[in-house]
Image: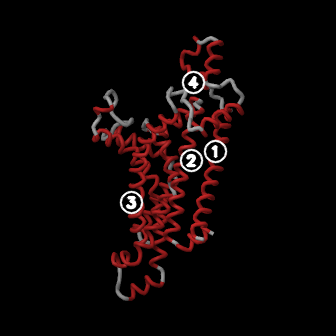
Amino acid sequence: MQLKRVSLYVIKKTLKLVSLLIAISVLSFLLVSYSPIDPIQSYIGADMVRVSPEQRDNIAAYWGLDDSKTEQFLNWSKAVLQGNLGTSLIYRAPVADVIAERFLASLILMGIAWLMSGFIGFILGIISGIQEGSWVDRIIKGYCFILASTPAFWLALLCLMLFSVSLGWFPVGLASPAGILTEDVTWLERAKHLVLPALTLSIIGVANVALHTRQKLIEVLGSEYARFAKAKGETGFLLLWRHGLRNISLPAVSLHFASFGELFGGAVLAEQVFSYPGLGQAVVQAGLGGDIPLLLGIVLFSTLFVFAGNLLADLLYQFIDPRMRKEELQ
């Protein structure tokens, strides 16, 4: 019986993922196809005036752009089912190769930012929860509310102007120094180029974790078993360690896993500001250049990435609360 419930749970999640991919693919294709950007002009570039109408028609036929919108989508869908995401018009390379190369850079950036935001947000939430009502609590809450309403690109521009332009502590952009071969770039140089984009993303992600942890800790410290522990003389760090830390840490981790979508959206803006060669910058270039195969490939991949994060959050919630696991599997 338990195996049957698990199988039904997996089938339900799989069907949800398939329907989500189909809906996002159709919507993204329609938005890109009917945009005012001419993919042929983006492909040719500044030499558009030198291209004859016959050459333009040949380019459109080569890329399948002379077909109807329905035929283009069906041809792309058939290729995807066969494991072929197509060829990028901008990079002149297979979409799968472009995504693999760009995602590695984005994964390092998002991974560092994800760990930093989780750790800093959890610590700030604990400090604010313990000091409820104090000036420290008000400062942390105000800081989190400001962060929650701050656009990622605006914060990235501030960091760029302060730490790169004014102070000169970090490079202005890119993932490595310009004019140096990839194999000659040291890890220290790569780390210096990662600091500002990772700092921007981590600061944005702090607010949700901190506020959630603060609220959970206040609820725990106001519970009956916490008041009983206080009556026995447990206070401060001892009370937090024995009764609060376990009850607030796992929900905070689950919430943090569910923030993959917000993290990816922030990475798109941060990578564009810092000219960081990741998947987010490739999304912007594909959209502005009318590169339909690359844009749809990245959309599908990012959907899988965000869905995996939400699935991990669901599984972690069920691990924390067995009652939720039983309800979900039924």
Relative image position of residue 87 (x, y in whole percent): 54, 30
Please determine whether, in this image, residue 276 is positioned above or below residue 203: above
- Image quadrant for the N terminus? bottom right
> Residue drawn 35% across and 77% down?
236
Mark closer to the chain start, 1 or 2: 1
- Marks 2 and 3 sit apart, C-alpha to C-alpha, by 26 Å
Whole-number angstrom distance, CA of label 1 to CA of label 3: 33 Å
Earlier in the chain: of badge 4 and badge 2, it is 4
Q: Quadrant of residue 118?
A: bottom left
**Tag 1 and tag 2, C-beta contact below 8 Å:** yes
> Which residue has dot 3 on it?
119
In which quadrant of the rendered view does residue 44 lie?
top right
Q: Are marks 2 and 3 in contact (CB under 8 Å)?
A: no
Q: Is residue 276 left or right of residue 68?
A: left
SS at circle 1: helix
What is the distance, in whole Å, between disc 4 and disc 1 at their CAs? 24 Å
Closer to viewer: mark 2 or mark 3: 2
Question: Few, some or many C-alpha atoms within 10 Å of disc 3 (few <14, some 14-19, many ≥20)?
Answer: some
Q: Amino acid at mark 4?
A: Ser
Q: CA distance from mark 4 to mark 2?
A: 26 Å
Residue type pointed to by label 2: Thr
Q: Residue at x 49, y 47 (%)?
A: 266
Q: Which mark is residue 24?
A: 1
Q: Which residue is mark 2?
A: 303
Q: Which element carries disc 3, helix, strand or loop?
A: helix
* Percent x, y of residue 111: 41, 50
Please give the count of numbered marks on the rendered protein. Answer: 4
**Image height of 139 relative to 271, above or below:** below
191 relative to 76, above or below:
below
Q: Is residue 278 above or below residue 256?
A: above
Which image quadrant: the C terminus?
bottom right
